[in-house]
């Protein structure tokens, strides 16, 4: 980043935007809460779009990651989660970020676990290495997935295509 003039400029502009928000709302938390993001999914999406427009370098997936990190009920629809959800037929393509988030929320509601936990479990399941959940090697990898170890293989489109 240090040698990337565009990123340095974005950091400066973002700091100014952050300062303006704090001057207007007294804190960044107050600014976030002014959107009532826990009140409805629509409000959460409005906040996401506002953040993307206000801050440079905050794209589609990074904005969801930020919202997840500040404790809002959303998962980040990164390539790992979208790959798993597509293979399971929960989304039709890996670019269906909003649908992936809805599916993540459905998992959280069905299991009673926080959506952040759901996010972490799926990422651990699909990353090359993730010892956080006792998984030495990810299972649902992009290449050479370990379908024989997967408890969801009977529901997996990828597995059914490979075994046909």
Image (spheres, rainbow, N blue to C red):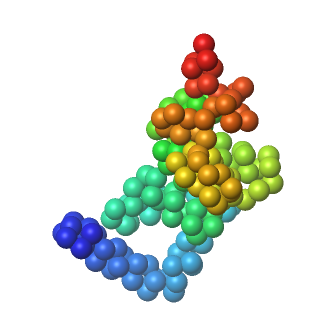
Front residue of 152/104: it is: 152
User: Would residue 21 be found to the left or right of residue 57 on screen?
Assistant: right
Q: Residue at x 55, y 71 (%)?
A: 32
Number of residue marks:
0
Q: Position of residue 156 (x, y in %)?
A: 65, 28
The image quadrant of residue 148 is: top right
Q: Position of residue 13 (x, y in %)?
A: 29, 74
The image quadrant of residue 120 is: bottom right
Q: Is residue 27 above or below residue 32?
A: below
Front residue of 18/145: it is: 145
**Can residue 115 be seen from the camera position used here?**
no
Location of the C terminus (image quadrant):
top right
In the current view of this chain or complex, which residue is farthest to the front?
A: 136
Q: Is residue 48 above or below residue 163?
A: below
The image quadrant of residue 21 is: bottom left
Front residue of 105/44: it is: 105
Q: Residue at x 39, y 83 (%)?
A: 19
Location of the N terminus (image quadrant):
bottom left
Q: Position of residue 22 (x, y in %)?
A: 46, 83
Q: Residue at x 55, y 52 (%)?
A: 129
Q: Position of residue 93 (x, y in %)?
A: 50, 32
């Amino acid at each position: 980043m240090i040698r990337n003039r565009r990123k340095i400029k974005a950091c400066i502009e973002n700091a100014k935007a952050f300062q303006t928000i704090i001057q207007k709302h007294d804190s960044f938390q107050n600014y976030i809460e002014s959107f009532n993001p826990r009140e409805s999914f629509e409000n959460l999406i409005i906040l996401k779009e506002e953040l993307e427009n206000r801050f440079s370098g905050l794209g589609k997936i990074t904005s969801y990651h930020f919202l997840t990190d500040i404790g809002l009920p959303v998962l980040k629809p990164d390539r790992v989660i979208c790959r798993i959800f597509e293979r399971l037929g929960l989304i039709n393509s890996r670019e269906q970020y909003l649908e992936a988030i809805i599916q993540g929320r459905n998992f959280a509601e069905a299991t009673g676990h926080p959506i952040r936990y759901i996010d972490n479990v799926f990422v651990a399941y699909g990353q090359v290495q993730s010892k956080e959940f006792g998984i030495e090697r990810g299972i649902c990898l992009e290449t050479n997935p370990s379908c024989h170890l997967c408890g969801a293989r009977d529901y997996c489109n990828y597995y059914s295509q490979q075994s046909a």
